[in-house]
Amino acid sequence: MKVIKTNSYQETSQKAAEIVAEQIKSKPDSVLGLATGSSPIGMYDELVKMDLDFSKITSVNLDEYYGLAPENDQSYRYFMNEHLFDRVNIRKECTFVPDGLTADPEKHCAEYDQKIIDLGGIDLQVLGMGLNGHIGFNEPGESFPVGTHLVTLEESTIEANSRFFASKEEVPTQALSMGLKQIMNSRKIVLIVHGKAKEATLEKALNGPVTPHLPASILQLHPDVTVVCSFNE
Ligand code: GLP
């Protein structure tokens, strides 16, 4: 595992963007696994400035709130359009985000896993990490979730994500999340972590025991992870 500690969010975003840009340049038809949350926003801004060719890229997103329509400005589909897809020349039909309105989550999740297999797997997966060490929406628990699944969000995650909503009551209580199998099968991973509040959790995830109580710790078992982090606010 490679850990790049920088002095600012700006620098973290720049470094992460360089890794994604390198992937796009070396394999223009890459399958990118993409993440939402505040952590990758700066990286998306940098990627847009780099004027890369996304015309052959396919993307699969980690997760989506269950119950939110793509047009809802809190949905992760909306987030991706706003921060990246509408700003680069990616073909929208080649961007995949779990469907927050699916009537049959189990079937949809199985199809999402199959889609990733059909695409030949993920070349580079971008990850953020929640305050409780979750990746995607794989929350701490007794076992590592394997496939894409419907998750009931932890109270602490609802609390943490409520900053993006008008009130805590509006935060969906469930989400669809890629599982750890798809994440761990990615050929490369870049994990972006910013902020003092996450420093101790990241330290445990990288150097403590690999445990489902801290989902990000599983990344220790992946052969090609780069962590880009900064802890100053
Ligand atoms: C959300 C997302 C995760 C993200 C995490 C951290 O819950 N599902 O994919 O990594 O939050 O968010 P932030 O980067 O805003 O701290």
Image (cartoon, rainbow, N blue to C red):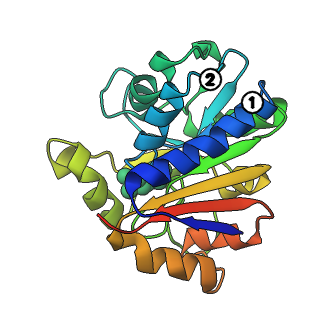
What type is the residue that disc 2 sits on? Leu
> Residue 124 at x, y = what percent?
71, 44
> Residue at 62% across / 84% down in the picture?
207
Give the residue type at disc 1. Lys
For numbered disc 1, what is the local secondary structure? helix
Viewer-proximal residue, 65 or 152? 65
Q: What element carries label 2?
A: loop
- In the current view of this chain or complex, which residue is farthest to the left? 167
In which quarter of the view is residue 232 placed? Answer: bottom left
In the image, taking residue 166 as reference, residue 184 lies left or right, namely right
Q: Give yes or no for contact between labels 2 and 1 (Cβ–Cβ under 8 Å).
A: yes
Residue, disc 2: 52
Residue 150 place in picture, x, y as percent: 53, 48
Give the answer, above or below, for where 164 lies relative to 193: above
Residue 47 at x, y percent in the picture:
53, 32
Q: Can residue 103 be seen in this view?
A: no
Q: Distance from label 2 to label 1 (Cα)?
A: 8 Å
